Amino acid sequence: MRITAIETQAIQPRWLIVKVHTDEGITGYGEPTLEGHVPAVMAEIGQWRAELLGKDPRQIQHHWQGLYRHGFYRGGPIQCSALSGLEQAMWDIVGKWLGVPVWALLGGKVRDRIRMYRHVGGETPEALAEGGRQAVALGFTAVKTTVVEAGVRHIDSSAVVAAAEERMASLRQAVGPTVDIGIDLHGRVSPAMAIRLAKALEPYQPMFLEEPCLPENVEAMASIARATSIPVATGERLLTKWQFRPLLEVGAAAILQPDPSHAGGILETRFIAAMAEASFAAIAPHCPLGPVALAACLQLDACTPNFLIQEHVTLGEGYLKQPFAIEDGYLRVPDAPGLGIELDEEYLGEMADAGAWLNPRCYCEDGSVADW
């Protein structure tokens, strides 16, 4: 089997699909979406096209090593996202060629259902509570929200802490004690503010505290983890096993959130999960992306013993001929070959996009740049 063509297609709202074609008529799909940087990822894939054409797509790890190492400058979100999408597509090809789902090639499934959580939001505590009630009515057993807006000062007022606690209290009252609540600080606050916020939120028993600070300083994140009983979660901006290793070494996180569309693909994320398992840490894959990215996550969730819960923002309605379905907060493990999906090419054409979406530009009250 040989690779005959590689295509990229940007689609609304902000996603990127890569298609790897073969001389046996099998096409594999991957999603190298890097929000706000889609044209750059498309260019990286285009640069690698000549290196992969004519090669056997079944040599997945061999190609991964070559693309990652031969450029001399390793890593980075653009390179790793491009690599992730191509790797997903090759797994899709191999699964289809053998007639088995990808999880069957990674040791087999260890569960029949995959627990999902729903994002909830609202400008006011009351609106947030209503979002929580709607999620529970749909059968979800876990939700995730944020309790701080962008623009928090390095050391901010007690009003910021009080507002965060009010939002959390409202949501907890709305969903009750049996529904888990994940809190995402989105790296918006300093370690000092994260510790103050965590202390205020602890009585409401959050499931996790996500990105309590930016991930570049693992010692700072470890200091937050030691200061709170709330499990710390992080990893959506980290790439490959090499960047996750320091987190585990210093005990900076109880839950790792690698993104198979950024971290290096399906197998690299499975390696990260195995490292986490050896450190008694859980895996909750990051996926605020499209249906192909979700399909890749589900293959990992099925075969990863220390999997905790799965993020999603779409079930593929319109994009997939048979969208995923959640029942009572869970999704059945897909059993179709490859990634287990069939894309609607006509709909993809209707949703074609220039890939010009940009991340929001956020500022503090004094006009200085803030993290989104």
Image (tube, rainbow, N blue to C red):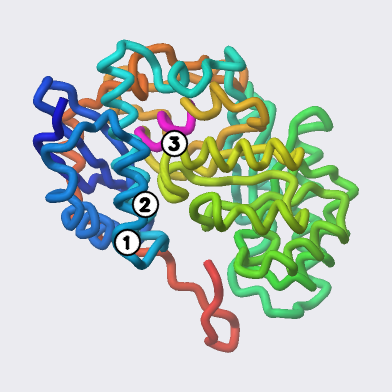
- Residue occupied by mark 1: 37
Relative to 198, residue 178 above or below: above
Of mark 2 and mark 1, the one earlier in the sequence is: 1
- Residue occupied by mark 2: 81
Rounded to the nearest whole Å, what is the CA distance between mark 1 and mark 3?
21 Å
Q: What's the amino acid at mark 3?
A: Ile
Relative to 148, residue 296 above or below: above
Whether residue 138 is visible here, answered yes or no, is no
Relative to 117, residue 86 above or below: below
Rounded to the nearest whole Å, what is the CA distance between mark 3 and mark 2?
12 Å
Q: What's the amino acid at mark 1?
A: His
The residue lying toward the viewer, choosing from 148 and 84, is 84
Residues shaded magenta:
292-298
Q: Tell me the crowding category of disc 2: few under 14, some 14 to 19, or many 20 or more residues within 10 angstroms, Cα based.
A: many
- Residue occupied by mark 3: 266
Q: Is residue 119 magenta?
A: no
Of mark 1 and mark 3, the one earlier in the sequence is: 1
Q: Position of residue 268 (x, y in %)?
A: 48, 41
Q: Main secondary structure of the magenta part?
A: helix
